[in-house]
Structure formats: structure tokens, C-alpha cells
Amino acid sequence: MASSSCSLRSILFSSPTNLRSNYSLPTSFSRNHLTCSVSSTASRFESFSVSSIGTGSSRRLFNTRRKVLEVRSMATTEQKQRVETYNQEENLAVDLAKFTADLSDKFCKERGAFTVVVSGGSLIKSLRKLVEPPFVDSIDWARWHFFWVDERVVPKDHEDSNYKLAYDGFLSKVSIPPGNVYAINDSLSAEAAADDYETCLKHLVKTNILRTSETTGFPKFDVMLLGMGPDGHVASLFPGHGLCNENKKWVVSITDSPKPPPERITFTFPVINSSAHIALVVCGSGKADAVQAALKKTGNVPPAGSVSAEEELVWFLDIPAASKL
């Protein structure tokens, strides 16, 4: 087995304020440790009523609840993409939880594993329904493998850390095995941390935790749950930045992020777009212009307009974010 700083390192899986800066393999692994294993969309939309996403018992649980939802769905001419618009963010959060839970059930049964990628920002708040009944009790958390599409190169107890955000709002409330949560090595430089994370992903491909896209050859995550910035950036891929054009590397570093902190690591578009399923969650009127430009491909199309998925891309929008469509 190849070694790297990512190999056999463990991170204390408790409050980020207790995280150690140096990593070493514990004598006996317990649930108190987190291990990172080694190394032309149309502008016209057709409106229709939304039925439950997915199948199975989780659909029956929400037959009654969905009756109170006022949801408008718009299908693009590309069958792999659809746009869901919600009159209330609370309803969006419920459907996002159901979307994720249904995929979890599907992949856990088909593959015995479920690979999930999240971003930072408001996305973690939108996942809050997953840690509430009935989802929290019905999801097979032991089979989840949890990743970040991007991360700020700061200590894990720092307020800018996406790890801390996810831990406080999500990870601390569910029973994902610590060894299945893959955080960056924040003791490294941004460039080294990106290389280290990519090595980690390549090992997981070799061990069949991660699939490989037959079309692109890049890792194929089961689902990515992404947010979008007011400027239309996704992950740490910002408008006009050269990293948007990277087509070989899996994970890259950025040291001049226009949004602080400047040093980050991020997945590249080939990795993002090789995902089986993607949920792009956007709320607020401040993002309406970017949503319009991304979906209608007008003006300077922001990075979000370049997001695609191999099987399904779903935009989850509240009314303010969709107001200019």
C-alpha cells in the first residue's frame, strides 16, 4: 500500500475544538476517531406538478406531507436536468432530504456503499431534515462515505472550515462511521493538501469504495449536494478563474480565492460532472441573476452553468432565487 500524509492518519471525531494537529494511527480504532484512508440547456421550460422523487417506503411516509407542498417543477429539454421551485425553504429542505434518502437507499442496496459529497455555505443548513425523523432513523448511515467538494485550508476548529460547519450541523448528529468521513489534512499547504486528497480518492477507487465513470475515467460519486454563490461559483471554482478549465487533475489548490480565505482545495469540473446525481441548492433573491444566467445560458454564464451530472442534475430553488427565470 502506498503511503502519504493521508495514509493511516486519524482525526479526533469530536468537537472540532478538540482536533489534534498531528495525526497518528490509534492503537485500537474506535468511534471517536475519524480516519482518512490512504492514499445547451433551453431557456423555455415546461411546467408540471411534481410527484414524489424516488420509490419505496420513504415515498409512503411523505404522501400526506407532499399534499401541503406548493411546488412548481420545470423540465429542460435535457432529460438529465430539472428545476424544482418551492414556495418555502422549509418545503425545499424536506424534498432535499427525501431526494438524498431515496438515493441512499438505492445505492446502499445496489452497491453496499453510498458516496456523498457536500459543499459549505448554506447547503449544510438545507440538509437539516436528514437529521430529523423519519430520515435519521431510516437511513443506513454505516454505509455512507462523506466527502467535501472544496475546503478552506484552515484548522478544523476555525470558523471558516467547511469541516467544522458540517460537523456542527450534520456529522455530530448522525452515526456515519468515523473512518468513512474524509477530511483534508489541514497541516499541509494548499497544494500539498490537494495532492493528498486526490491520493486519498485514488485509493478509494482502487478499493471499490468509489466508482469510476465509464465515460470520463474520473471518479463517479453517487451524489453531490452543492450550493452556489451570488456570483454563480460552485465549489471553489470562481467566475473567470483558470481552474474552471482544469481537465486533468481531480483535486486542485487555489491560493487567490476572490472570496476569503484565499487558500482552498477544490474538486475540478471533470470530477463534479462525472457524478451520478447532483443537487444544486440555491436560495435567496441575491442569487437570482446567477440562476438566470446559469440556466438560460445568457450573458457571462457563471461556473454553475457548467455543472452537469451523468444521470441526474436537480436544481432546488426557492421562489426568490427562481424569480428571474
Image (cartoon, rainbow, N blue to C red):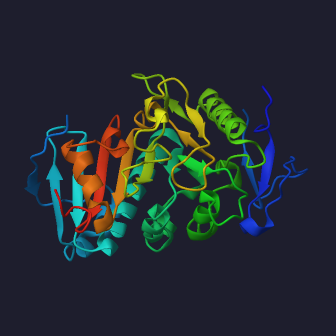
The residue positioned 18% from the left and 72% from the top of the image is 70
Picture quadrant where residue 200 is located: top right
Could you tell me residue 195's position as x and y percent? 67, 33
Residue 273, above or below 155: above
In this rendering, position of residue 51 left or right of residue 157: left
Does residue 53 appear in this view?
Answer: no
Q: Nearer the viewer, residue 37 or 20?
A: 20
Picture quadrant where residue 289 is located: bottom left
The residue positioned 86% from the left and 51% from the top of the image is 22
Q: Residue furthest right?
A: 27
The residue positioned 50% from the left and 68% from the top of the image is 136
In this rendering, position of residue 3 left or right of residue 147: right
* Tag count: 0
The residue positioned 32% from the left and 72% from the top of the image is 89
Does residue 58 appear in this view?
Answer: yes
Could you tell me residue 264's position as x and y percent? 61, 46
Q: Nearer the viewer, residue 242 or 87?
A: 242
**Quadrant position of the C terminus in the picture:** bottom left
Residue 212, above or below 160: above
In this rendering, position of residue 271 left or right of residue 201: left
Q: Nearer the viewer, residue 300 or 35?
A: 300
Q: Residue furthest bottom?
A: 68
Could you tell me residue 105's position as x and y percent? 43, 52
Could you tell me residue 243's position as x and y percent? 49, 34
**Quadrant position of the N terminus in the picture:** top right
Picture quadrant where residue 285 is located: bottom left
